[in-house]
Image (cartoon, rainbow, N blue to C red):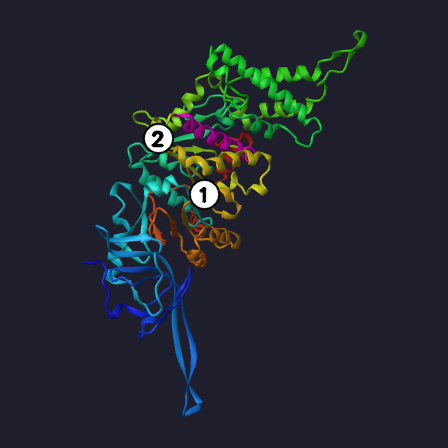
């Protein structure tokens, strides 16, 4: 018995036009046009009795045509010609092999001219919504809200497909992106061995780790105030973790005529210093195959000593005469830039690490905190980047992403457990390649590699951004799932339009009309591209980014002079305290 049955009262009209993108239905039933709205779901007849094409109403129109009677050509009747345009998104089968009541994306055959069209509403709508989620095993369901067309039906994603094939949450500021992320993290936290790393640019998600009901571990990239006495949850990313290109992107001025000499001596000394560490640690097996990019500790002060020696050493010329050295004076500017970074406390997380961070096993222990497991440890890790200087943000995020990915890459296949990187404010460090500077390109290379290859090794990206037009097209094009909240900028809308299938591109026009917490959800993880009313996270886990009620606070809350003084001191010390 089919779950959905249609009667005359559900009939709307007949198909009059068919192409690969749209189907036009002429409304032939009186008052049917009053029941139709853009976004409604309809069913179209096929040549098979137990099969219906499912489509979404894209356009509703009323045109007027003249009908001239032969007897009175001077007094024509003006008659309405009503039609709707729909996009086919899948097929409903009352029976498919041994299965009953199945909905599948895609179309095997298009409708014929004069095929009947029915509105899916009432009981049929409820039954259809139940079909959408029935094939998702309950423990794999990722509930994110309710369908706008039937608020009693849960909008659930297939958790496997959502995380394994990359995803993006996009929308203007204040549209509800952070709430959506927090809700997803809440749902994921119920799993026993969740493995998610959140790159939190502004400390928005701290309540998930520090609130009344923590579901995550909190880490913070060391700020200037954390350098001298770091707590256990303070992360350092010492300089030796960066590969050659990442370090040079921060130090080298490509326009300097001595840039090739500087890069050459830097590379030679770093390789030799790393080799010395391996010999000291009796790691002969690693020594035989390591490269200058291998993450092996070395002393920065020793590197500076060697560079300064190069920069000042003289040569012995003919007749024993002292002449200018091969590198003399050519490394001076490079050394100055390196020393200024080393002494600046805002870069202390990189150039002033504690002695512990120079030990050979430090990297393994640090990555175990982020990817490993121990009793009582939460599987979701929030990493607060809020005190990282913006000029090195791309290198920092890119280096950490590269390390996490490489651990997975080099791990034996049977030992891998998948993890997801949630890239909050992705436009800050994953820009369009053509707009990226030398520093940003280093981060882009790492993240784009994950986007293109990560699925094979159990690594996925969930990009979150308010400016899709400023995010790497390579990364967005690799995403198979999109949660798109309100967007009003034409450039951003254009990006979304290009990412969606042809049959859904008209959906983009709905984006400026979405309310806070409403989203269009499209992708492999959801069978029906739908408008969804997103769930709010619990009170204990709501992000700090909640929009301020300006008018209310101006009426009730007095500015605090003492807080201004404290903020000025925090600004001077580069530490919130």
Which residue occupies 63% across, 24% down? 263
**Left or right: 499, with 434 as reference point:** left
Q: Quadrant of residue 322?
A: top right
What numbered label is drawn on residue 478?
A: 1
Q: Which element carries disc 1, helix, strand or loop?
A: loop
> Where is 76 relative to 525, above or below?
below
Q: Relative to 491, say whether 448 is above or below.
A: above
User: Which disc number belongs to residue 350?
Assistant: none
Residue 474 visible within the image: yes
Q: Residue 44 appears at what percent x and percent y? A: 31, 63
Give the labeled residue for mark 2: 417
Q: Quadrant of residue 347?
A: top right
Residue 192 falls in image quadrant: top left
Which stretch did the figure color magenta? 389-411
Farthest residue in the left direction?
1
Nearer the N terminus, badge 1 or badge 2? Answer: 2
Q: Residue furthest right?
A: 319
* Magenta stretch contains residue 459: no
Name the residue: 55% across, 21% down. 292
For the question of whether residue 467 can be seen, the reply is no
- At mark 2, the secondary structure is loop
Look at the picture and state if 461 lies above or below 150: above
Q: Is residue 37 left or right of residue 269?
A: left
* Measured Cα–Cα span from mark 1 to mark 2: 21 Å
Q: Nearer the viewer, residue 282 or 534?
A: 282
The secondary structure making up most of the magenta span is helix
Residue 576 position within the rendered picture, expressed as x and y whole percent measured from the top left = 48, 32
Give how far across and how far down residue 177 sits, in percent: 41, 46
Residue drawn at 44 percent across, 42 percent down: 463
| Residue 14 or residue 472, whichever sits in front | 14
């Amino acid at each position: 018995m089919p779950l959905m049955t249609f009667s005359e009262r559900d009939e709307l009209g007949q198909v009059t036009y068919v192409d690969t993108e749209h189907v036009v239905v002429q409304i032939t039933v009186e008052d049917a046009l009053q029941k139709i709205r853009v976004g409604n779901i309809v069913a179209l007849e096929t040549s098979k009795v137990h099969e219906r094409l499912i489509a979404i109403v894209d356009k509703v129109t009323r045109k007027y045509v003249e009908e001239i009677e032969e007897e009175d050509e001077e007094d024509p009747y003006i008659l309405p010609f009503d039609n709707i345009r729909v996009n086919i998104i899948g097929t409903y089968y009352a029976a498919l092999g041994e299965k009953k009541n199945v909905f599948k994306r895609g179309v095997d055959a298009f409708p014929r001219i004069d095929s009947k069209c029915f509105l899916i509403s009432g009981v049929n709508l409820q039954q259809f919504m139940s079909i959408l989620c029935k094939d998702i095993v309950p423990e794999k369901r990722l509930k994110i809200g309710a369908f706008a067309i039937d608020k009693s039906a849960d909008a659930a994603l297939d958790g496997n497909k959502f995380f394994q094939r990359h995803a993006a949450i996009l929308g203007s500021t204040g549209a509800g992106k952070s709430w959506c992320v927090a809700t997803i993290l809440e749902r994921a936290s119920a799993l026993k061995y969740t493995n998610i790393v959140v790159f939190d640019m502004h400390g928005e998600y701290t309540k998930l780790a520090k609130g009344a009901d923590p579901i995550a571990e909190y880490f913070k990239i060391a700020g200037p105030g954390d350098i001298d006495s770091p707590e256990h949850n303070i992360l350092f990313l010492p300089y030796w973790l960066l590969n050659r290109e990442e370090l040079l992107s921060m130090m080298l001025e490509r326009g300097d005529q001595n840039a090739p000499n500087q890069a050459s001596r830097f590379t030679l000394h770093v390789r030799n210093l790393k080799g010395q560490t391996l010999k000291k640690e009796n790691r002969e097996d690693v020594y035989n195959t390591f490269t200058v990019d291998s993450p092996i500790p070395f002393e920065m002060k020793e590197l500076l000593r060697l560079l300064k020696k190069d920069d000042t050493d003289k040569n012995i010329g003919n007749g024993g005469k002292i002449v200018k050295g091969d590198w003399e004076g050519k490394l001076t500017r490079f050394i100055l830039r390196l020393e200024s970074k080393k002494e600046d406390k805002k870069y202390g997380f990189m150039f002033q690490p504690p002695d512990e961070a120079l030990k050979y096993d430090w990297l393994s222990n640090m990555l175990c905190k982020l990817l490993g497991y121990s009793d009582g440890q939460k599987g979701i890790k929030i990493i607060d980047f809020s005190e990282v200087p913006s000029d090195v943000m791309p290198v920092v995020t890119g280096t950490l992403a590269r390390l996490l990915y490489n651990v997975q890459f080099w791990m034996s296949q049977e030992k891998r457990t998948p993890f997801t990187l949630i890239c909050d404010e992705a436009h800050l460090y994953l820009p369009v390649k053509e707009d990226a500077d030398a520093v940003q390109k280093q981060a882009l290379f790492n993240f784009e590699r994950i986007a293109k290859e990560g699925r094979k090794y159990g690594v996925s990206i969930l990009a979150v951004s308010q400016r899709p037009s400023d995010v790497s097209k390579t990364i967005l094009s690799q995403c198979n799932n999109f949660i798109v909240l309100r967007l009003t900028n034409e450039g951003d809308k254009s990006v979304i339009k290009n990412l969606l299938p042809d049959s859904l591109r008209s959906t983009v026009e709905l984006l400026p009309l979405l309310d806070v917490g409403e989203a269009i959800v499209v992708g492999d993880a959801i069978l029906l591209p739908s408008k969804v009313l997103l769930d709010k996270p619990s009170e204990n886990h709501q992000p700090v980014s909640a929009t301020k009620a300006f008018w209310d606070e101006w009426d009730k809350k007095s500015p605090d002079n003492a807080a201004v003084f404290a903020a000025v001191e925090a600004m001077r010390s580069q530490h919130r305290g």
